[in-house]
Image (cartoon, coloured by chain):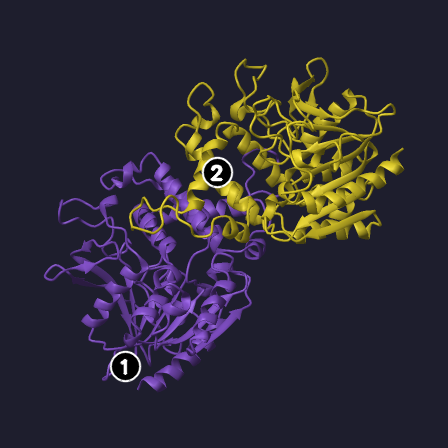
Chain colours: A yellow, B purple
Amino acid sequence: MSEVSSTHTDIGIVTPRYFEFGAADDGLLLDSGQVLSPVTLCYETYGELNSDSSNAILLLHAFSGDAHAAGFHHADDKHPGWWHDMIGPGKPFDTNRYFIICSNVIGGCRGSTGPGSINPQTGTRYGLEFPVITVHDMVKAQVRLIQHLGIPKLLAVAGGSMGGMQALEWASRYSTLVHGAIVLASTSRLSAQGIAFNAVGRNAIMSDPLFYNGDYYDREAPARGLAIARMVGHITYLSDESMRLKFGRRLQDRERMDFSFADQFEVESYLEYKGGTFVDRFDANSYIYLSKAIDYFDLETAHGSLERAFADSSSRFLILSFSSDWLYPPYQSKEIVRALMRRGKDVSYCEIESPYGHDSFLLETERQAPMIEAFLSTISREHR
Amino acid sequence: MSEVSSTHTDIGIVTPRYFEFGAADDGLLLDSGQVLSPVTLCYETYGELNSDSSNAILLLHAFSGDAHAAGFHHADDKHPGWWHDMIGPGKPFDTNRYFIICSNVIGGCRGSTGPGSINPQTGTRYGLEFPVITVHDMVKAQVRLIQHLGIPKLLAVAGGSMGGMQALEWASRYSTLVHGAIVLASTSRLSAQGIAFNAVGRNAIMSDPLFYNGDYYDREAPARGLAIARMVGHITYLSDESMRLKFGRRLQDRERMDFSFADQFEVESYLEYKGGTFVDRFDANSYIYLSKAIDYFDLETAHGSLERAFADSSSRFLILSFSSDWLYPPYQSKEIVRALMRRGKDVSYCEIESPYGHDSFLLETERQAPMIEAFLSTISREHR
């Protein structure tokens, strides 16, 4: 796909690490007013922190992502981390220059505290007793991690989709702690259409008879509901064009139709496969909590207006959108750009032509790489 | 919404009628090679057939539609037929001039033979023993109805979405029986994205534990699966813009968020309501059969090319698409128009600017009315 090709050697084997906090202090005060304690954050790092701690970049993952952004956990892993093409020696997030951190979000299910964790008050798993969390809550936990790592100010935060929402929260509320924000395929608030798709996913999960109101951890997981939710999600991450290019109307395992229900299109098999494998790595309750956090994210409502959300921000911004992204469409990125410009903020924006829909930020390595490299070089000169 | 407003008096009370065939003869030979017998078609008519039987228009309904296109079944009905604004005295399908017929499709569940009908070979309901049907099969049954009604040649066929697919089949294969074809918000073949959404709906139904492989008629219906399928469908019938205009990010029954799962957006409540009411009037097996018929519809593959599909057609065409329709997007209508023009066929085309997405053909009465009226006037002068 790109010049910065993946090999086993560039990042190599990485080991997840765990930061625990909140047991000995007040814990994490959430936007809901509830307190989460203790809190574990799973994170990974790539590269080395420099002597003045000025080269740290925090990567923020999307809905179904995790801390494993690059490299391999085991020598026989088939797939590297989710942004492997972007991270490593000589890559845009250049581990020869930068210290890269990626942490899993709270509410997730990939090593950090979430609904599948033990509720210390009951000794059993939270399930739906887990407090509602927001994108801001995710960022509050990340702030603690950065302090723990001894980083006074991040060179940059960067993320796509829900990761971009976190980057916007960082730049809006914690801009003294972050020099630059890279926001890819994201929005200051999800559309009604986006909320609707998330609602369908949650309905599919909650309609699964194995859901048991979220209390399924000692039983079989609500796999079919979660798979259907994932199928819906997958369609929204692609585009009409990319699905036409990838699948068209080809049938699976046969040349022509014989008018039985065994006739299946490739796109159906693909979605069923993707839905089916998702349940092995994702928790249905996390699907509910994280999709709710995405729905609730709304910088306008939280601050009165988008301009006011960034009024006090000292961060610089790189905002990228993708032409065929209909879930977080370019017009939403442009609204952010306009609000920043009205406030005289330093913002670079590009709408990248791509057929790959919302997933473009994971796929268009070559197109986005030069802009991210240039942005990081510029701010790292300023930041020294 | 429009000048041609709905009243109880214009069409008034109508009574569905039933045409039965196939018991005494060979039945209906389906594209699958199977034979359906007996066959019942539920239909309604509005207006009067003229003395030379030259004023008949057949309306073709969409996926979840039925024969009840206009008027009311009972004096206390809250809602009229699905295209009431378009049908009646002085309306585009003017019952002072035309004899309007609308028939339910086979495979459906609104009075015509479908998977919920009794299989004469077993004495029990077909369920998934019902043969796979195609859009062409639906049209074959309609041809029998038209012959039964003593109509040598229809003035026009007209329909949107799946109804437009039927209109295309009529004009492609039976153009000696139809003078003009009005094709709204339709396509010669569904996109991979459209197939994917249908696949999600079918998966939701089949994952419902009450589905019992389609054999649920003596039990509780798989209502939750069907409701989820309908929710997905509904999103695809609307548009990003129409959902923003209609719902935005307003919360249901509260002013502001309190970060509990009781926070729900209006769009969620709307979809759940629409999904929930759908199960009262639609059969899950029909959802499966009709969505498969839509997926399988492919004039290119059936005829070798779109041009060849219309090579022998003597029909005139009016094709309308809607700018915000992303399920059956305008570029697909344009492909049909280009194929017709290359063959020198008589085709009028307009892409109507509208925010209402795929549902526009049901809502944009004022915009589409003048074009349909003019088209019908022109062909009815020729047809006399």
Alpha carbons under labels 2 and 1: distance apart: 51 Å
Residue B365 shows up from this direction:
no
Q: Do labels 2 and 1 share a chain?
A: no
Residue at 49%, 42% (x, y): give it. A232
Q: Which chain carries label 2?
A: A
Q: Which of A173 and A158 is in front in this view?
A: A158
Q: Nearer the viewer, residue A130 or B179?
A: B179
Give me the disc on residue B167.
none
* Left or right: where B71 falls relative to A29: left
* Left or right: where B82 falls relative to B18: right
Residue B212 shows up from this direction:
yes
Q: Mark 2 points at which residue?
A: A229
- How crowded pointer 1 is (Cα within 10 Å; few <14, some 14-19, many 20+) is rated as many
The quarter in which the C terminus of chain B is drawn is bottom left
Q: Mark 1 points at which residue?
A: B54
* Left or right: where B111 falls relative to A282: left
Residue at 68%, 14% (x, y): give it. A23
Q: Which amino acid does label 1 sit on?
A: Ser
Q: Nearer the viewer, residue A189 or A374?
A: A374
